[in-house]
Image (cartoon, rainbow, N blue to C red):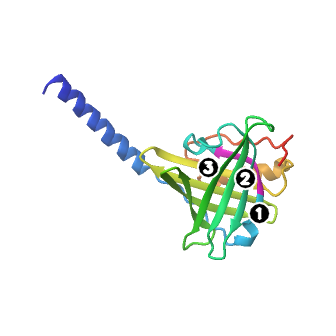
Amino acid sequence: FTEKHSTMSLLSVAIFLFGLVAVSAKCPLPPINKNFTNQGFEGTWYEVGKIQTIGGAIFEHNCVCTRIIVNFEKNGTATVSNQCNDKTPQGKLLIENGTLTPTTTQSRFTETFHFGKFTNSVAYNVMYLTSDLAIEYDCGDNLFGLNYCFHVFSRDPKPISKPVADRLIQLAATDKLNPHDLRFKFTRQQGCSY
């Protein structure tokens, strides 16, 4: 072997091993939400906070005043408009729309985003839902690794009480939905004009 062949062989082995590790990392699956209804999840939700990997934060990295607007069609698909302001409440409005396609399991969808000619799909799970609070967990595993987001939402942009927030955040640990052991970050909703 020449030095060039040796380097190429090592690079090939490294890529292969990276692929094995990346592919072996599978998305955790939250419990099925038996209380879920499309009507209950439809409408505007304000983000209380999130646990999010780097891949999941591509759109939301500098977001404040984060909210989603969910609109269901009669066939069960939905449009989710992910909206936030860049860095400050007066910052540029950022919007990324996704499409939810229902799976055969209640409260579970495939969310698809379109970026020009490219699309990206993730598993989208509404794992907790009451009339005023929701938790959405989305996750994708591919050659770039495991990327996930654990979002806590409220119907009201005002902060929720600490005991309620702590109880909801604990579900990420209880259901093993935070394999990278990332910290929960509260989302700024003060001073926002929606």
- The residue pinned by badge 2 equals 152
**Vertical side of 33 occupied by 183: above or below:** above
- Point out which mark residue 43 bears: 1
Which stretch appears magenta?
Answer: 45-51
* SS at mark 2 in the image: strand
Q: Can the viewer see residue 64 in this picture?
A: yes
What kind of residue is marked 3?
Cys
Question: How far apart are the alpha carbons under marks 1 and 3?
Answer: 20 Å
Answer left or right for 153 relative to 140.
right
Earlier along the polypeptide chain: callout 1 or callout 2? 1
Q: Please, is residue 99 above or below residue 139 in the view?
A: below
x and y, in percent, of residue 91 in the image:
76, 36
Q: Amino acid at mark 2?
A: Val
Left or right of 43, for residue 21? left
Residue 58 sits in quarter:
top right
Which residue was labeled with disc 3?
149
Q: Earlier in the sequence, mark 1 or mark 3?
A: 1
Judged from the image, the secondary structure of the residue bearing numbered disc 3 is: strand
What x and y, as percent, mark residue 97? 64, 55
Element type where label 1 sits in the image = strand
Magenta includes 174? no
